[in-house]
Image (spheres, rainbow, N blue to C red):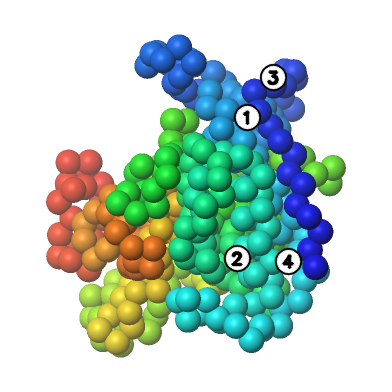
Amino acid sequence: MAAPFRPAFFGQATVSARASTFKGAVLCKVANRSSGRKTALVTQAKVGDTLEEFLLEATSDAKLRQTMMSLSEAIRTIAFKVRTASCSALNCVNTFGDEQLAVDVLADKLLFEALKYSGCVKYACSEEVPEPVDLQGSGFSVAFDPLDGSSIVDTNFTVGTIFGVWPGDKLKGITGRDQAAAGMGIYGPRTVYCIALKDCPGCHEFLLQDDGKWLHVKETTEIGEGKMFSPGNLRATFDNPNYERLLSHYIGEKYTLRYTGGMVPDVFQIIVKEKGVFTNVTSPSTKAKLRILFEVAPLALLIEKAGGYSSADGKCISGLDVPIEAYDQRTQICYGSIAEVRRFEEYMYGNSERFAEKGAEVNA
C-alpha cells in the first residue's frame, strides 16, 4: 500500500529573492487580479530559479500556483515509483477497455491525492478514471494521463505524465485554448517538469535535483526548422495514401528518425531540440487513439507556448481549438514548427490556408 501523500503546500507566502546562477530571463505578464483590474505586472522569471520562485513571478493566481506545486509533488513521487514499482499487468481494465498496469494505477492514485490535498481543484479525471471525481476544492479542474507510455516501462524507455488545468468546474464544453496551464512530467535518465501557463510566455523546464527541489533550467520560445521526425501510427500508411506520401517526403529529404513509441518523449524532444515534427494519423482501418482532453490539448498548449504549432481533428485547425464534447473524444494530431505543420496540412488535406499569410517556406 502506498504511503499517504503529503504535498508541500505553497500559497501566497513570498520567497526571498536570490541571484540566478544561470543566464537568461523571460518577461511574464500576469494579471493583477487582487485589484480587480486588467492592468499587467511585468515580472522576470529567471532561468535558475526554483519552481516556487518562478510561479510567484509568473502568475498572481495563488490557487494556480498551489495546483502546479501539488502536481509537481505528485510527479516527483511518481518518478521514484516508476524506478521501483512492479510493471506486471493487473487483472483489471479501465472503462475505455485499456489494460492497466500496476504502475499506472499507482500514478493515478498519487495524482488524485495530490489534487485533492491542494484544495484548489473541484473536479479531476484521468484516462484510468475518465468520469470527473469531485475533489471538493475550488478554482480549477484537471484532466490527466497518469503514465503515458506505460507499455514501454519494462523496456526502460522514457515515459511521462500529461495534464491540463482548466479554470472552473467543467471538463466538457471547453477547448484546449481555455486552459490556465498544462504540463508533463518526463521520467527518464533525468526527471523533468515541463509547464506552460496561459498568461506567461514560453514553455519552461524544471529539473529535479538531488535535494528534491525543481530548478528552472530552460525556457523555449521558438520552434525552428530541422529535419527530425517522429511518425506515430505507421500502420495508417497502408490505407491512407496522403500519410504515405508525407512519410516518403521525410525519408526522401533524409530526415532523422527519432521515435520511441511514447508520446511524451517524442513531443518533448521537439521542445528540447527546438525543431522537428510529430505525427499521429488515422486511416479507415486504424482509428484515432489519442484523447483530446487528456493528451492532445495539454501538449498543444505546451508546443504552442514554446513557439510551435499544431494541427488536429482531420482539419486545418489548432489542437487548442477542437471543441471537447466527450471525455473519450479522440483525434489525429501533428505538432511541430510552422513549416512542418503547414506541410502536414498540405499533404494531408491539399491546402493550408491558415498559414498562407505567415509566409512559411515549405518545399512540398
Report the Cα–Cα distance between label 4 and label 3. 33 Å
> Of helix, strand and loop, which one carries label 3?
loop
- Residue 130 at x, y percent in the picture: 47, 65
- Residue 26 at x, y percent in the picture: 53, 26
Give the position of the N terminus as an image quadrant: bottom right
Q: Amino acid at mark 4?
A: Val
User: Horizontal placement of 329 versus 303: left or right?
Assistant: left
User: Horizontal placement of 288 versus 24: left or right?
Assistant: left
- Residue 209 at x, y percent in the picture: 79, 44
Residues at marks 1 and 4 touching, judged by CB atoms closer than 8 Å: no
Residue on which the image places disc 4? 82
**Label ID, residue 54:** 1
**Label ID, residue 14:** 3
Q: Amino acid at mark 1?
A: Phe
Residue on which the image places disc 2? 147
The answer to whether residue 336 of the structure is visible from this angle is no
Which residue is depicted at the point 47% across and 58% down?
A: 132
Q: Amino acid at mark 2?
A: Leu
Crowd class of label 2 (few under 14; some 14 to 19; many from 20; radius 10 Å): many
Report the Cα–Cα distance between label 2 and label 1. 26 Å
Crowd class of label 4 (few under 14; some 14 to 19; many from 20; radius 10 Å): many
- Residue 341 at x, y percent in the picture: 31, 56
Report the Cα–Cα distance between label 2 and label 3. 33 Å
Residues at marks 3 and 1 touching, judged by CB atoms closer than 8 Å: no
**Label ID, residue 352:** none
Residues at marks 4 and 2 touching, judged by CB atoms closer than 8 Å: yes
